[in-house]
Structures are given as structure tokens and as C-alpha cells.
Image (tube, grey):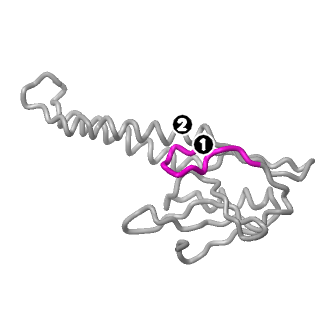
Amino acid sequence: MRCDPWLPVLCRLALCFGLAPVVMHQATEWAPWHPQTNWGGVLLGCVLLAMGLWHLVAFLGSRIWVDQASGRLHLCRLSLGLERDGGSWSWALADIEAVVLMPQWRAPLASPPMIELRLVGGQRVPVGTIATSVPGLEEHAQKLALLIGCGVETPDKAPD
């Protein structure tokens, strides 16, 4: 099972790969050697393409699976962000209290949720690589909670 659902990744790819060529076309008029080339627009188009690829690599490089026979959850999370929370972990299913759709302070207007695990003792572990308001995250969290055998929680506000 992937750490994030497909829909948010596809929306990010569509946005990045759909907007980048438009920005680059407007900046270069399909002639980069033209004397009126807007190199800021070219750079913005390249950054948008890189962001789309960045999210695709993080999506494909992250996975989570539940080993019911040994009673363990294994998480391999590739984080391409500035935070250092990537890596591989394993926990006993009994140590996981809940799957949490935790609001994140990553957007200026809204705080989109990201899937996290709450362990016994209150430790929170990020599962998802994308904080998004795109539909599909709740169903993904429900599937994960069903595999683990715990509930899904949705706090009202992001952590301080």
C-alpha cells in the first residue's frame, strides 16, 4: 500500500505538468534564443516541472504494509522535504493507537490534513508525504486503520 492515495499525486502532476509548459511558452514564445525571453518565466516553468517530478518520486518511494502474521506495521517513507523524517521503521500493531488525519500548517489559507500514526505514549509519526485537501485522503486513512485494527481521528486544529 502506498503512503498517499493516487488522486492528490495525480492532481499535483496535472497542475505541474499542465502549468509548466504554459509558463515556459509565455516566457520564451518557443524560442529561448529570442532577445525578449523572460528568463524568470523559464526558471519558474523548470521549477514547476521539478516539483511535479519531486512529488512523483516521493510517492513511488514511500510505502506502508501490514504484516498480519507477525503483527507488525512496516513503513518506508521517502521524504524529499526539508524535514528529516524519511526512513524505514517497524512497529507492533498493538503499539499503534490511531490513524490521525492531522492538519498541517503548510498552506497560507487552509491547513490540509496529512496521514499520521499516533503511537502509545503520544508519539506521532508522519505516514503521508503530501498534505492535501484533495478528496481521497479519508478513504486511504480508513483502509489503513482497517488493516491495523484501530480507529481514525481528525483533530480540529494543527499542533502548536
The residue depicted at 56 percent of the width and 77 percent of the height is: 156
Tell me, yes or no, whether the highlighted magenta stretch contains residue 81. yes
Does residue 25 show up magenta in the picture?
Answer: no
In the rendered image of this protein, does residue 141 appear above or below residue 87?
below
Q: Name the residue under label 2.
A: 57
Determine the residue positioned at 70% across, 61% down.
117
Give the number of the disc on residue 78. Answer: 1
- Position in image of residue 113 (x %, y %): 54, 64
Q: Residue furthest right?
A: 69
Q: In this view, does 56 lie to the left or right of 70?
A: left
Pick the front one: 23 or 88: 88
Drawn side of residue 33 relative to residue 1, left or right: left
Q: Check contact, mark 2 vs mark 1: CB within 8 A.
A: yes
Tell me where residue 140 sits by quadrant: bottom right
Give the amino acid type for the residue marked by disc 1 in the picture. Answer: Leu
Q: Which residue is drawn at 80% across and 58% down?
A: 148
User: Which stretch did the figure color magenta?
Assistant: 79-89
